[in-house]
Image (cartoon, rainbow, N blue to C red):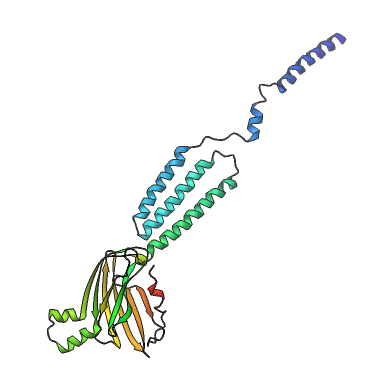
Amino acid sequence: MSHGRGKKGKRHKKNKYPTRQTESSPAEQPSTPLASTGTMTQKTDWFGVVVPLLISFGLTIIIINNDAPGVLIVAWLGVTVAIAWSLVKLLKRFPWAWWKKSIPIGFAMVIVFCVAYWDIGQRLRPSFVFVIPGVLLNGDTWDFIVNHRGPKTGYNAQILFVDDDRLEYLRRTTKTLSPQDLNSYQLLLSLPEVNPKGRGTIFAKQFQWKPFSLANSHFTAEITWRDGAAHEEIHIVRVQDKWKYAISLNDRETGKSLVHCKDDGFPSLESLPACFPGINDSD
């Protein structure tokens, strides 16, 4: 009986030894520390990073060459998604938590949204050409200045300026109008371009006109340029030895009011913003 227990005890020692050797085996130890340290990173998917960036560059070309609201909005959304996707692919190599990765992605999207908001706002602002009274020369002749508002240059501009008071007089007193009569109440002015803030010329584009009724003058102007057209009405009166004027400018295609103002003291019941200095500041 004692001999049998001795054998059993020996077998028990032999089985216990390899178990200890398996637990401390150096072959199994290297994989555990590397997996737990979190230092292993994925390879960067450069194809997934570069291709969306190239797409965003292509969309910026569309943005530069288009002014349609729908096209601008869709193109800027595409740029935002493309840049966000590139950052997602680029940040995959870093073993960060998802919320840490979302910080640079969100920050980049905010920047793109701000740039897009500014760009769309600038592109959708109306750009137009119009005429404003300048100074009275020699006590009987107005110097009219061709003005501009908006971010885009007006190309191939034409202005048909009409003295309504003289035209009305001729209609009442003349049955047929001669070429001299036509030239006495209207002027056709052609300009290759009118730039924002008066760029491109040293002096502002202007012309002189001797009105038919100096103390109470009415003028109209039909204005066209490559991207639009407008109808303008100008009314100038003398109030207590001071000249006051009112201007109304409407888009000829849509009827939208572009400029509607009057000087302080101009005889009108309409509540309108002041013309000076607002419309004299071309932007």
Q: Which of 48 and 165 is in front in this view?
A: 165
Q: Which residue is drawn at 40% across and 62% down?
A: 122
Is 99 left or right of 69, judged from the image as shown? right
Q: Quarter holding the N terminus?
A: top right
Q: Residue at x 50, y 45 (%)?
A: 87
Q: In which quarter of the image is the C terminus?
A: bottom left
Q: Position of residue 182 (x, y in %)?
A: 17, 79
Judge by depth and name the residue closer to the eye, 82 or 162: 162
Asked if residue 96 lies left or right of residue 273, the reply is right
The quadrant in which residue 142 appears is: bottom left
Along the viewing direction, whichever of 104 and 206 lies nearer the viewer: 206
**8 relative position to 68: left or right:** right
Q: Which of 146 and 50 is in front in this view?
A: 146
In the depicted structure, whether residue 200 falls above or below residue 246 = above
Image quadrant in which you'd find residue 170:
bottom left
**Above or below, 138 relative to 224:** below
Q: Residue furthest bottom?
A: 240
> Is residue 1 something one can see in this rendering?
no
